[in-house]
Amino acid sequence: MSTEDIWQGLVWDLYKEHVKKFSHAMVKGMPSEEEMKATVLQILPESTVKVLAQEKVGMVVQFHFMSVYPALEVAKVPVSEVKSFLAQRFGGGKFKLNLYHGINFLSTKNFETEGPPLWKDMVGKVEDTSLY
């Protein structure tokens, strides 16, 4: 995979959210794009993206584990194709994608897809064996 694919992809987008919202950027100042890219390349092999499906039950929102992907596997999925990636695997619905480095949560992003909710047939059948 070329690094150019990574900079157009899902993991890079999630990592930038982490730096903007969840890091100490406000105190330390924003790192340069080169520094962020170097960090992404360093943490990518140890990172994962967890997919959760959102279901509103009455006044409560539940999140159901769907899958976890090695970040290297989904890093090349272009941001413009994330909805298609989700719809092909899980159908229509609201999804939360969480980026982790090891067991440390970095960021999250929500997506909504169209179509029949195929994911509902997966609830309870897919076990979350991750540590987080």
Image (tube, rainbow, N blue to C red):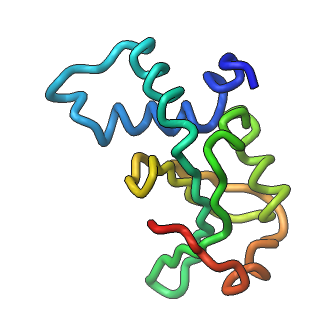
Q: Is residue 107 left or right of residue 9?
A: left
Quadrant in which the N terminus appears? top right
Above or below residue 130? Residue 31 is: above
Q: Is residue 7 left or right of residue 26?
A: right
- At x 75%, y 73%, the residue is 119
**Residue 70 or residue 97, whichever sits in front:** 70
- At x 34%, y 32%, the residue is 20
- At x 43%, y 26%, the residue is 39
Quadrant in which the C terminus appears? bottom left
Residue 86 appears in which quarter of the rendering?
Answer: bottom right
**Residue 78 or residue 59, whichever sits in front:** 78
Above or below residue 32? Residue 8 is: below
- Residue 61 in percent (x, y) is at 48, 76
Furthest residue toward left = 27
Q: Is residue 56 left or right of residue 121?
A: left
- Residue 17 in percent (x, y) is at 43, 36
Above or below residue 18? Residue 107 is: below
